[in-house]
């Protein structure tokens, strides 16, 4: 059984919020998406993707990695179809991270650069791997980290929901120990707040309601300029 809380904020620069998340405790399902596209297409993509994952997991009636992967595939297909059928939505897409409780722990699926992290006695570390130019091209080429932080391709995704079919989904299985935290977030948090600061906020919030830690994480991102929408979802065993 998990305790869960989520919070989303427009940030300090954007005029709309293209992030979207849902906590479906009865399904053991937790989903976050960060949309992209012209006008309000990004909002449509993120909401459609998340709602589709929830719908398909509920329809599957079981909790396993195959059900989760099938749900993410269905989300990709629906976003693609919506984009192709409406000129105002053309080119829209979204990142997505979904975590599903299973008998062994959590099954996690990710597309794009929204992330899942684990905080336990062993430290604070990313569970997911970004599908970005930096991760899949820049680092393998040996480009220095300092140069990558300034590189013009640093924000380019190599995969997104609604961008292509077939879809490449990264999947993970984790068994968080009791008392540990799982953080799922958009790049509005991890892209502007250093991991050490995120860890410090989470450790300082040990024993307090998760909603308070969510608020402090949002405040940290806004304090760093809040250039993007910010969404955080916390799970605690």
Image (cartoon, helix red, strand yellow):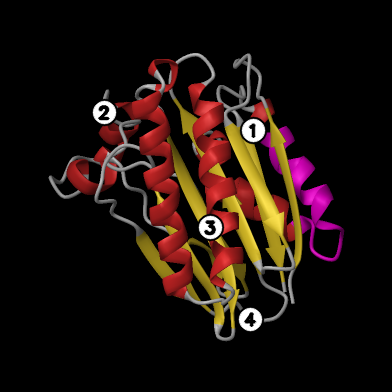
Label 1 sits on a secondary structure element that is helix
Whole-angstrom CA distance, mark 2 to mark 4, is 37 Å
Coordinates of residue 210 in the picture (x, y in percent): 80, 56
* Picture residue at 47% right of the left edge, 70% below the top: 67
Q: Tell which circle, 2 or 3, labels the residue nearer the N-terminal end.
A: 3
Can residue 49 be seen in this snapshot?
yes
Q: Which numbered disc flags the more N-terminal residue, 3 or 1?
A: 3
Q: Residue 94 vs residue 22: left or right? A: left
Q: Circle 4 — which element?
A: loop
Q: Which residues are magenta?
A: 204-220
Asked whether residue 210 is drawn in magenta, I would say yes
List the residue tagged with mark 4: 177
Q: Magenta span has 54?
A: no
> Dividing the image into 4 quarters, which one contains the C terminus?
bottom right
Examine the rendered structure and indicate whether residue 88 appears above or below residue 148. above
Q: Which residue is mark 2?
A: 153
Report how far apart the C-alphas of labels 1 and 2 lie in the structure: 22 Å
> Disc 1, disc 4: CB below 8 Å?
no
Q: CA distance from mark 4 to mark 3?
A: 19 Å
- Which of label 2 and label 3 is nearer to you? 3
> Residue 73 or 171: which is nearer the viewer?
73
State the residue at coordinates (38%, 26%): 85
Query: Residue at (50%, 77%) from the top-left corner?
Result: 64
Mark 3 = which residue? 98
Q: Earlier in the sequence, mark 2 or mark 4?
A: 2
The 10 Å Cα crowd at callout 4, few under 14, some 14 to 19, many 20 or more, is: some
- The residue under label 1 is 221
Numbered disc in front, either 4 or 3 = 3
């Amino acid at each position: 059984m998990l305790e869960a809380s989520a919070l989303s904020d427009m940030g300090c620069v954007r005029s709309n919020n293209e992030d979207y998340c849902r906590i479906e405790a009865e399904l053991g399902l937790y989903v976050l998406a960060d949309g992209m596209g012209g006008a309000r297409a990004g909002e449509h993509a993120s909401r459609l993707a998340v709602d589709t994952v929830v719908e398909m997991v509920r329809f599957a009636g079981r909790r396993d990695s195959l059900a989760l992967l099938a749900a993410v595939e269905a989300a990709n297909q629906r976003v693609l179809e919506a984009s192709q059928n409406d000129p105002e939505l053309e080119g829209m897409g979204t990142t997505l991270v979904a975590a599903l409780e299973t008998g062994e722990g959590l099954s996690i699926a990710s597309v794009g650069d929204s992330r899942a992290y684990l905080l336990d006695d062993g430290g604070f570390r990313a569970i997911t791997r970004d599908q970005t130019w930096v991760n899949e091209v820049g680092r393998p080429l040996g480009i220095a980290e300092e140069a990558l932080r300034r590189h013009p391709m640093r924000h380019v995704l190599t995969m997104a929901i609604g961008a292509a079919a077939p879809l490449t989904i990264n999947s993970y299985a984790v068994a968080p120990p009791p008392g540990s935290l799982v953080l799922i977030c958009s790049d509005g948090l991890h892209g502007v707040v250093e991991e050490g600061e995120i860890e410090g906020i989470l450790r300082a919030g040990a024993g307090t309601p998760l909603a308070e830690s969510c608020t402090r994480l949002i405040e940290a991102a806004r304090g760093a300029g809040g250039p993007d929408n910010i969404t955080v979802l916390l799970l605690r065993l």
